[in-house]
Image: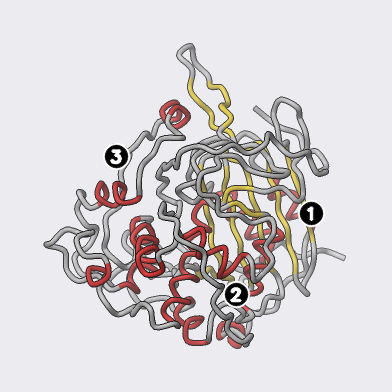
């Protein structure tokens, strides 16, 4: 089906939140969450603001912001998405655009201040909390996971340093389609099922590890962040939601960002998420999956709040210089199964919670390097990217109907339009 672009205006809030038993579903692109809730503790002191190390490296000259290219990019997948929202901010240009509808029944437009599920963008928040704990000397990134979480991994595993959990070099295996519901119909039916974090890790480690030596290769996955979240829980005695809230959300006044523990709804204005479910007689119908477990990748935010978070991160408001360096250090290792077409051209391209992407320039020169993170959960795909100097920052969300994976083609089109658009003729 095709949806025509509609200008955006805020929609009214959805149904009032209701509480339900803690739910878990796993998405290979979603970050881990935790279930233990401890007593709230005072928020740790924030590091003194400082210029992030990446900002000193500079960037190539940014092309002029091309609003037409951006609008064309977010409108380029009418058969695969129901709605799109994108926002560009920074000294090098401002732009906000929407496409499609927030609700396929009412045809309400996509709200420019709409909230959405973050999926694996949650990993950047988890990594930030872990690095804060490292700065507080509560966790040693060189120590093996087994030192902190005995019995969590099989006894025959080699020592797996905590650092490797964050930069995707741990060698931990991933869940497969056989471990949990994976077909559209089953996903819709079981999206509130309860799967504790320990169960997800236990299922994952039944599979073969992708490579033998931890730290020797990089490959993206979720299991390392499931274990990292368990480690946050063990060290602090609090749920990951509480740690993120008191260490990041409250200090930065991210009032439209939440880390729900049990509520399956999205509060405030938002676009609905859908999943195309094949029908016995042929064709497919869209199932509304807006309400789903808030477990895997369960954070909710807005493009404005993600922009504020990314800005604070690169200005050094959340991490001290040593931890910021850790966040942005990309291991000099091969990427498992990588090709020349990957962001790393066959080599690693993730740091500890952020990815590094160099986009080709339209004139063939050295392209713009950006740092950021993508995320996806059923009905929602989003991302945040910035130049190291924060001159141009992009945040976006779209509502894919094809499942929980990133629509790489659409993500690339949005990124290219923001950072490497065709030259504007005058």
The residue that disc 1 covers is 68
| Mark 3 surroundings within 10 Å by alpha-carbon count, few (fewer than 14), some (14 through 19), many (20 or more) | few
Residue 222 relative to residue 111: left or right? left
* Residue 303 vertical placement versus 250 (above, below): above
* Residue 379 vertical placement versus 129 (above, below): above
User: x, y (%) of residue 315?
Assistant: 64, 80
Residue 108 relative to residue 122: left or right? right
Q: Earlier in the sequence, mark 2 or mark 1?
A: 1
User: x, y (%) of residue 49?
Assistant: 64, 85
Q: Nearer the viewer, mark 1 or mark 3?
A: 3
Please name the residue shown 80% across and 64% down the image: 94
Please name the residue shown 35% across and 65% down the image: 234
Q: Quadrant of the N terminus?
A: top right
The residue that disc 2 covers is 313
The residue that disc 3 covers is 179
* Dot 3: element: loop
Q: Quadrant of the C terminus?
A: bottom right
* Dot 1: element: helix
Q: Quadrant of residue 13?
A: top right
Residue 401 relative to residue 295: left or right? right
């Amino acid at each position: 089906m095709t949806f025509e672009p509609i200008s955006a205006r805020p929609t009214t809030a959805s149904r009032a939140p209701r509480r339900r038993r803690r739910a878990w579903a796993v998405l290979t692109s979603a970050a881990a969450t935790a279930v233990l809730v401890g007593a709230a503790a005072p928020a740790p002191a924030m590091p003194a603001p400082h210029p992030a190390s990446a900002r000193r490296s500079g960037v190539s000259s940014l092309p002029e912001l091309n609003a037409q290219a951006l609008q064309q990019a977010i409108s380029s997948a009418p058969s695969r998405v129901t709605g799109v929202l994108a926002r560009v901010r920074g000294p090098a240009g401002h732009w906000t655009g929407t496409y499609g509808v927030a609700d396929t029944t009412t045809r309400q437009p996509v709200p420019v201040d709409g909230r959405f599920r973050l999926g694996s963008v949650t990993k950047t928040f988890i990594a930030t909390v872990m690095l804060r704990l490292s700065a507080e000397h509560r966790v040693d990134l060189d120590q093996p996971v087994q030192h902190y979480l005995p019995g969590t991994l099989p006894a025959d595993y080699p020592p797996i340093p905590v650092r490797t959990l964050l930069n995707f070099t741990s060698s931990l295996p991933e869940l497969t389609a056989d471990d949990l519901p994976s077909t559209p119909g089953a996903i819709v039916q079981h999206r509130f099922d309860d799967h504790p974090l320990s169960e997800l890790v236990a299922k994952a480690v039944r599979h073969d590890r992708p490579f033998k030596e931890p730290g020797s290769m990089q490959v993206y996955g979720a299991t390392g962040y499931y274990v990292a979240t368990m480690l946050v829980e063990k060290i602090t005695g609090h749920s990951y939601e509480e740690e993120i809230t008191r260490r990041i959300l409250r200090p930065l006044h991210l009032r439209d960002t939440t880390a729900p523990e049990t509520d399956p709804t999205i509060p405030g204005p938002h676009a609905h998420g859908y999943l195309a479910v094949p029908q016995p007689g042929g064709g497919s119908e869209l199932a509304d999956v807006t309400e789903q477990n808030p477990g895997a990748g369960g954070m909710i935010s807005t493009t404005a709040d993600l922009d504020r978070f990314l800005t604070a991160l690169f200005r050094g408001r959340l991490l001290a210089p040593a931890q910021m360096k850790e966040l942005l250090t990309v291991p000099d290792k091969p990427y498992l199964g990588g090709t020349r077409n990957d962001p790393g051209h066959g080599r690693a391209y993730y740091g500890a919670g952020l990815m590094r992407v160099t986009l080709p320039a339209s004139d063939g020169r050295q392209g713009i390097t950006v740092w950021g993170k993508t995320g996806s959960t059923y009905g929602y795909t989003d991302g945040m990217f910035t130049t190291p100097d924060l001159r141009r920052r992009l945040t976006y969300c779209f509502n894919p109907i094809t499942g929980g994976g990133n629509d790489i083609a659409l993500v690339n089109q949005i990124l290219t339009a923001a950072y490497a658009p065709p030259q504007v003729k005058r």
